[in-house]
Image: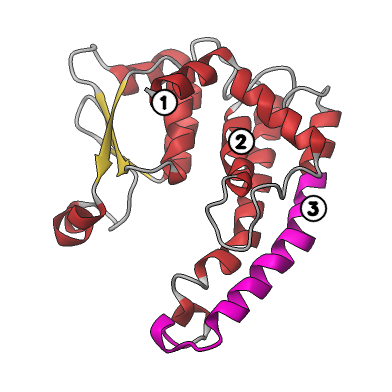
Amino acid sequence: MSIEAARELLIGNGTTPLKLEYFAIEGVAEPVRIALSVADVPFDDVGIDFKDWFSTKKATTKYGVVPEMTLPDGSLVTESKAMLRLAGEADPEGKLFPADVRSRLKVEMTLGLVADLDKAWNPAMYVGMRPQKFGYPPKEEWSEGETVIKKLRTEFVTNELPRFMGYFADLIKESGGKFLCGENLTIADIAAYQGIGYYRRGIADHVPKDCLDKFPEIIAYLGRVEAHPKVAAYKASKAK
């Protein structure tokens, strides 16, 4: 898809704004929000109240999940990674999701590594929310729940997190020391920034906010992403 075609899909004639619907949290929609902002694509960021989600909104979505993106022509886009790639395609500078096949392949491989990090964390994360899906009793009946959750999350921070931070540090070095895929910020960096940054926010029990401090090259990398002028401008707009 050309840059022009992507921008036509996302912006149309400029009279009807793109709409992105998700909960009023960062979550899986945040990389999409950042990418749209970097690509200079205006959008309405519609926050869904959790109460409304369960009472009415969920039943109106195509697959029972969000985010959902409504294009100016009324077409619906589902799946956050599809949205991220579309936003990348619309970058006027052609840097977020480069058209060159070799460069794009590197972006795709790096997106896969970010997904692998998420997969490694998900059991430790979701066992505390939906233990039945992992073969444990319901939360209210699970007397050993806190012990198991602490064990899984501590093991992740001790073993899996350092392994993946090593992979990302190697990619940064191989790419010249600035971003994961080279000199320019890509959608892979946006996804990695959000995925890795999660672990220093103190959101999950037993995952200390300083767990990334032992990886200075990763901390420096996250800082470079945040310092990108358009990422910084987006962050500043959210802080208001």
Q: Which of marks 2 and 3 is nearer the N terminus?
A: 3
> Looking at numbered disc 2 in the image, what kind of residue is underneath it?
Tyr
Neighbours of disc 1 within 10 Å: few (<14), some (14-19), many (20+) = few
Residue 239 is marked as: 1
- What x and y, as percent, mark residue 74? 19, 31
Residue 156 forms part of the magenta stretch: yes
Marks 1 & 2, CB-CB < 8 Å contact: no
Coloring basis for residues: secondary structure
| Quadrant hosting residue 204 | bottom right
Q: Which of marks 1 and 2 is nearer the N terminus?
A: 2
What residue would you read off at disc 3? 162
Residue 100 forms part of the magenta stretch: no
> Looking at numbered disc 3 in the image, what kind of residue is underneath it?
Pro
What residue would you read off at disc 2? 193
Placement of the C terminus among the 4 image quadrants = top left
Task: Describe residue 56's horizontal placement relative to residue 164 as left or right.
Answer: left
Overall secondary structure of the magenta section:
helix
Foreground pick, 183 / 49: 49
Marks 2 & 3, CB-CB < 8 Å contact: no
- What x and y, as percent, mark residue 161? 74, 54
Q: Earlier in the sequence, mark 3 or mark 1?
A: 3
What whole-number distance in Å separates the C-alpha atoms at marks 3 and 1? 31 Å
What whole-number distance in Å separates the C-alpha atoms at marks 1 and 2? 18 Å
Figure check: 156 above or below 60: below
- What x and y, as percent, mark residue 183? 73, 17
- What x and y, as percent, mark residue 170? 84, 38
Of the residues tagged 3 and 1, which is closer to the observer?
1
The part of the chain drawn in magenta is 137-166
Q: Is mark 2 on a helix, strand or loop?
A: helix
* Residue at the spot 78% in from the left edge and 61% down from the top edge: 158
Q: What element carries label 1?
A: helix
